[in-house]
Image: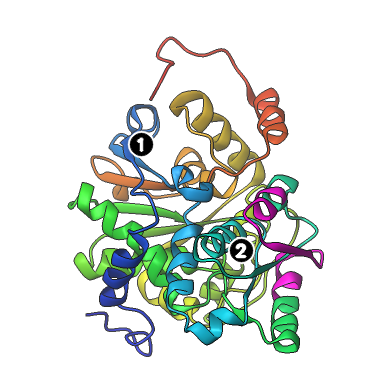
Amino acid sequence: MLKGVGIDNIVDIHDIEEAKAIVGKYARKTPLVQSMFLSRNVVGGDVYLKLENMQLTGSFKFRGANNKINHLSKEELDRGVITASAGNHAQGVALTGHLLGIDTTVVMPDEAPQMKRDATRGYGAEVDIHGATFDDAHQWMFERAEREGKTIVDPFNDKYVIAGQGTIGLEILDDIWDVDTVIIPVGGGGLISGMATALKSFNPNIHIVGVQSENVHGMYASVKAGQITKHHDDFTLADGTDVAVPGDITFPIVSELVDEIVLVNEDEIAHAMKDLLQRTKVVAEGAGALPVAALESHKIDDRWLKNKKTVAMVSGGNVDLNRVSQIIDQFLKPVKADGGIG
């Protein structure tokens, strides 16, 4: 049982186990594969990649969206649902709406990648482009919901969304019950809140590391300040975690259960995206590459990694191929003799 003040009734392992039964009817159990490149050349321990880029819609976000929508009443569904997202949660809501035959509206910011806009429309959602940043779109979501009577499916600050994301933690434990360290991208905090709840409920000694961009790190700033704090300096390649202000549900969970949050810069994110593609044959978007960026830039103390079993979340793979090409051109070097799949 989690002992943190005020968080026990937000989400617990029973909520996550219930979510597993619901989401399991729709979502894939994604692979957990060892990266020999990261294990041998970077860490000196066993590093595994949890490949949520292979999830339906190309991101873990499908899990939380699906669990939340499956908990709505018929009246709430009949009003139609609305959300805000830079792209991945948008697709999770849109696909779930398509599968269940409900009306979905997604507010996306100007900075949302075109391929994510197109994919969301392709699942049948109405896409409303509004505001320069995710936080602008998020505020407009509340205003439209109030004006039109739509049901909100928040991208991270929701018990059922958090529980849906926590099912990934259960899958990791199914494959590696004695995992030592788990590294997770952080935006609004829904993913890491759910996963930390699942993992720590099984073993409180599992070391949970969050990773954010130096350019946008609302959760890092909030944990450091001891209160919810806004942080947004500039654009980030990790657009899936471009959240300036964490949720009032996720913040206390992260404060209680996450052992540390580290920051990486844009070059480190791009380099990790390139290495994931070139060395491990994994296509990752910027947010999905954050944990590998933290490993490669040695932002995590060796005592949590060396001779340990570490899982790095590849949270999504929805990246425009033009951006992938630019990153490869920027960092491409001849493959060493030990190159190849790893």
Quarter of the image that includes the C terminus: top left
At a point 74% along the width and 54% down the height, the residue shown is 235
The circle drawn on residue 43 is 1
Contact check, label 1 and label 2, Cβ < 8 Å: no
The numbered mark, 1 or 2, whose residue comes first in the sequence reads: 1
Q: CA distance from mark 1 to mark 2?
A: 25 Å
- Read off the magenta span: 118-138
Above or below, 190 against 34 in this view is below
The label number, if any, that marks residue 24 in the structure image: none
- Residue 188 lies, in percent from the top left, at 56, 68
Judging depth in this view, the residue of 131 and 232 nearest the camera is: 131
Crowdedness near tag 1: few (<14), some (14–19) or many (≥20) residues, C-alpha within 10 Å: many
Give the quadrant of the N terminus: bottom left
| Left or right of 176, for residue 102 | right
Foreground of the two, 270 or 117 = 117
Residue at x 64%, y 66% (from the top left corner): 243
Q: Position of residue 72 (x, y in %)?
A: 47, 80
Amino acid on which disc 2 is placed: His
x, y percent for residue 138: 69, 73
Q: Residue at x 72, y 78 (%)?
A: 139
221 lies above or below 96: below
Q: Position of residue 8 (x, y in %)?
A: 32, 85
Q: Which type of secondary structure does the marked residue at label 1 adopt?
A: helix
Q: Give residue 217's mark.
A: 2
Q: Is residue 209 above or below residue 147?
A: above
Colouring:
rainbow
In front here: 40 or 133? 133
* Residue 132 magenta: yes
Say whether residue 4 is magenta.
no
